[in-house]
């Protein structure tokens, strides 16, 4: 099944952490992202002996998997990692800049067969505008979406 | 491994949502079920930049996967979906009606090699009886289980 | 507001743990219960710097609060505890024994103004019967509820 | 502290459920809302003996507390409820209708000392428009926010 | 009850967010901490209409409460905030520096009536050492604890 | 990808439970571990109709999968189980005993290509020492890590 979407295959690494301090777990997230993980997330889980534990999951390109496994074995308390290949359906991504009353904002577009079906103001671009202007982040997002809509209504 | 159970293969679609309002996420669940998803569920996850995000997961027949992917890309903020085939072991299902003091209730039976090993009053049938009689749902469930047990003790 | 229910006041202690291994958090639960906590529970929370942390909550009689605070400060990584008085509405509790095909089971009853409005098979009593007979715990629960219902239908 | 906000006092009822089927817990939410609860929510918690339990919380006016406590004691497995008075800061609420390409949408406004500081399209109004037009809920929300902004820019 | 501990009273602000994007919720955490919140945390909750929502909680000195409420009403989708005063038991805090093979590390000590009962290497101090030396954070923590123990065994 | 790690293949069984009492779910965890599951964990999930449900996951050797599936179908409310093969990367494990002021403690070592990269005091060994001496579990862990470090610094 592709349904007109882009596809790729990524590697998912996963491990259950029941003897690591959350302070350290939090710091590992940044290390993994810096080392090329595409995404890293934590899921609260409940393990044996009443342990309120955490499942760490990450997605990466296969070429990065070994380096990321090394980080997990070195920086966390893991003695084992689950490794799975996962197929993805993806929208083609494109970036566009829109002019708003708060300055220029980058908008990420998601396309299916050349047609835009997703529009998402870029977080860091909005955050920069929010800091620059002192306006709430939500106002920046709304302005970016409105500016994008206005621009494409005209065309 | 089948161990005497029925088996099938389903498709699991999964995506991490870190920029969608929970109001909309909640509404998408219904849309996906209406469009033929076998099951839809949310898992609270924690993503980068302190985001309290949600993993949306669904199971479906392969034939429905493309239509459900279209809904996810249209109705949520997803730019990508993970797609996996998953084998299932299943009990054979059968439905039976039992007579209770609260009226007739449907009971779902799960069978392994012809033998009933699961008995579950149907939620909607119990809810209807609860609304009809004003009795607590728990009382309806208990009555349905008791009626099923009594009926099969006699036979 | 009492609405015909029993009432009491308990103390709730609460702390957010972001630098304790779940192995140790799990073990603390047992220690707190052994030292007289009425209830202890963990809530998954998300703290600053991407930490997948845990909120530990307990209820106790005021007379036990100091001893339990000592355990928390000694056995966990807490530097502070929140202390609140909380009013409770409660059902009057009574225990009854019912005879089932799996042996005698204790049932906990909850009464409002002398009338039974809750019926709950006691977990440990059911577990003992399950281990004694090799039958699933769910079957024991169902049998206990059915026996209680039958016994009170006759009377 | 009021800081120019409206204030009121509500009652919070809370109970930990470790022996209720999620099917029934889910149905109780609707019953509580129908009986006048202002808000009802579930928090995943972890209780003794490895139980993946649920904390049910609700807010209500004091005048509704007894009726809601009766529902909780009747419809759930609770033997006790925690009862707390809680002060709230609130925005003054006002509703306005805006015209969009998808029809009229109701927008909820939040005011502090007469000034609008929150703008939220009403969920049910957006859902109705989404069903009427077949357009994604997110598009309706965006259109409502844009229409509100345009209308107030003109004035 | 003080039990020989320091005590204070803080204000807890809490709100349930069911219509805010997690991207924005995450960014608000930093803003609240920068504005003087003592602690900010998110709890995954489940609200009506199948919404996977978030409870935002913060602790602050009463003097900061109004400014933090303003941020919450401006930066999130909240129309209301719960405000409670909460008593705390606290250890007296002291900081000490220890020499390790990875450089000097700050250790936070918690004292009850002048006696040290908690020892926690400071996260930022350990992170700096980890970045400086390239060694895992866990090794830094262990070295700091060992150095502290050795130093105090000698004295 | 093996990257110098040991590898194996395990079976993961998973099911979503929306109609089982947490009391019973908790008891099933022990039964599954006793029957040879390598790991069992619960994840809080949110299913349709506002149900605060639980995902039960377990890992096992393929040879144990059928017996564990039988337990799940008998002891829980599952009508279906997801079955997946999952590859794992693992550290080689070795156990060593260290002498501490609290008695001998077992330490679990994780090795990559013969080199120790993980050191974890064994929970049950620490717990026994904690009970024997009345000292906090955290102190035992710290002593075991320090003893291991000292012993290997000398050699």
Image: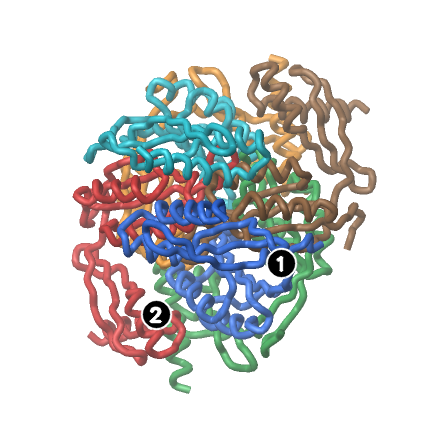
Chain colours: A cyan, B red, C green, D blue, E brown, F orange
- The residue that mark 1 highlights is D88
- Location of the C terminus of chain A (image quadrant): top left
Element type at mark 2: helix
Q: Residue furthest top?
A: F155
F2 in relation to B95, above or below: above
Disc count in the image? 2
At x 48% / y 35%, what residue is drawn? Answer: A17
In front of the other: D100 or D108: D100
Element type at mark 1: strand
In front of the other: A130 or D105: D105
Query: In the image, F41: left or right of B143?
Result: right
Query: In the image, residue A79 lies at what x, y percent?
Result: 45, 28
At x 76% / y 29%, what residue is drawn? Answer: E95
- The residue that mark 2 highlights is B141
Label 1 neighbour load within 10 Å: few <14, some 14-19, many 20+: many
Q: Chain of mark 1?
A: D
At x 41% / y 43%, what residue is drawn? Answer: B20
In front of the other: B32 or B55: B32
Q: Quadrant of residue D24?
A: bottom left
């Amino acid at each position: 099944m592709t349904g007109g979407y882009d596809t790729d295959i990524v590697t998912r690494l996963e491990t259950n952490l029941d003897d690591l301090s959350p302070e350290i777990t939090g710091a590992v997230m940044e290390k993994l992202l810096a080392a090329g993980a595409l995404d890293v997330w934590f899921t609260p889980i409940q393990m044996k002996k009443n342990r309120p534990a955490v499942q760490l999951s990450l997605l990466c390109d296969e070429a990065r998997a070994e380096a990321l496994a090394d980080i997990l074995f070195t920086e966390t308390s893991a003695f084992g990692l689950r490794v799975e290949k996962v197929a993805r359906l993806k929208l083609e991504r494109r970036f566009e800049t829109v002019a708003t009353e708060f300055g220029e904002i980058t908008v990420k577009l998601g396309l299916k067969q050349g047609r835009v079906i997703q529009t998402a103001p870029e977080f860091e671009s909005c955050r920069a505008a929010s800091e620059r202007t002192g306006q709430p982040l939500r106002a920046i997002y709304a302005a970016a979406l409105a500016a994008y809509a206005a621009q494409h209504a005209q065309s």
